[in-house]
Amino acid sequence: MEERVSGPQKYFAKMPYLSCRGVTANMAGGRAGQRLTPGSTLEVQFDADRARLSGFSSSNYKSFVIPEDGIYHVHFQASVWGKSARDIGDNVNAYITLTGNGVNGNIAAVTQQYVRSGWYQTVQVSVTEFFTKGQRIQPTIYLDSGASGDWCVADGDVDTGFYAFMISPNTGGWLERSPGPAADLSKWTDGEYVSVQTMNERTVGQLRAKVNPPRITCRNTSFNMQGNPPDKNAISWQYMYANDQFDKIAIGSGWGSNTGFTIPHDGIYLVSVIGNAKMMTPPAENAQFAFQIGIYRNLNDQPYILLQSGNARKAHESGLLISDVARFSKGDRVNIRFFGYTSTSKWESGRSDGRWWTMAFTHLGRGTYGT
């Protein structure tokens, strides 16, 4: 009983996590922080005294060792300060890199254009992925080669952070079939006959569901859109990986294939979406033009989750991250739509591989929120 029930419950009560808030500072200037060099990638170093690691380890507080196989969610945000910025903006790229066990490179990326001198701009990136024991995760920042003057990653606790937590322990990889959500729990009653089936449903079955929750990841897209698209602006995904019945669909007549998937279970989902769009025909030079990336349910006109930003540079990407927890219902047809302003502009997906365009949904539990 201890091995099959109490032991796993204790483990799930404190799974591996890390929380790093604030970086070491090597620049005073206009703002204390970690110096950024134009045309170079900075391996962000966090302050060990403000880091909290459980299971994870690090020798330098730049990269962090995965303690065991499992599904993890990783989030990095950096507040960048620049003494001067060009009218067209200066690109700032945020990456999450993974090394070890045959992998070496960026697994998630967001780029933004810094446009206001002497101020702060936060760039964020996150990823939900299967990692193996011994791999290393690391956040990095790249600054545009055309930037000038003093630049840094701000050192404050609220400015820059790196966070990771295990969603579930798992040795079967991303595609191991999920058993689906656990059955509803009910209280034991005095005198109740406890069958093997009942015991399994209330113990082992609950734990198996936690070990391998339903999840899907969509990667890679390619589009070329006119600004102010009137309709059918859901993007199509080249690859969709799932361990449950997330059916790949065209969300409606006339919409492209693989523009969405169906939600297999009611519940609360961890949502992570990265999108980086490139403006190819700006209506005016050196002016910001807005774009939106939204999560929609079914063919609804109104987004369920929406983020907005701007792009001032022709043929350069500008990106957004959606990182949220929200309730979805079984049968919902989830889709991502892109909208760029104005009608005389043209937008492309840019570098459209899985690091620059990705969407991940992970079922966290049935929940009652939203009902």
Image (cartoon, helix red, strand yellow):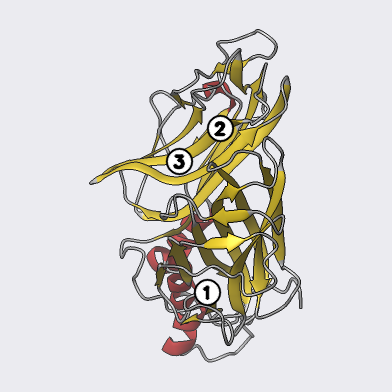
Label 3 crowd bin: few (<14), some (14–19), many (20+), radius 10 Å: many
- Quadrant position of residue 129: bottom left
Element type where label 2 sits in the image: strand
- Dot 1 or dot 3: first in sequence order is 3
Circle 2 residue: 92
In the rendered structure, which amino acid carries the disc numbered 1?
Thr
- Residue 175: % across, % down: 35, 69
Looking at the rendering, in which quadrant would you find the N terminus? bottom left
Q: Is residue 50 above or below residue 287?
A: above
How many numbered discs, if any? 3
Circle 3 residue: 96
- Residue 251: % across, % down: 57, 81
Mark 2 and mark 3: Cα distance apart in space: 14 Å
Looking at the image, do the residues carrying marks 1 and 3 touch, with CB atoms under 8 Å apart? no
- Residue 31: % across, % down: 68, 14
Circle 1 residue: 259
Label 1 crowd bin: few (<14), some (14–19), many (20+), radius 10 Å: many
In the rendered structure, which amino acid carries the disc numbered 2?
Val
Element type where label 1 sits in the image: loop
Looking at the image, do the residues carrying marks 2 and 3 touch, with CB atoms under 8 Å apart? no
Mark 1 and mark 3: Cα distance apart in space: 26 Å
- Residue 198: % across, % down: 49, 87
- Quadrant position of residue 318: top right
In the rendered structure, which amino acid carries the disc numbered 3?
Ile
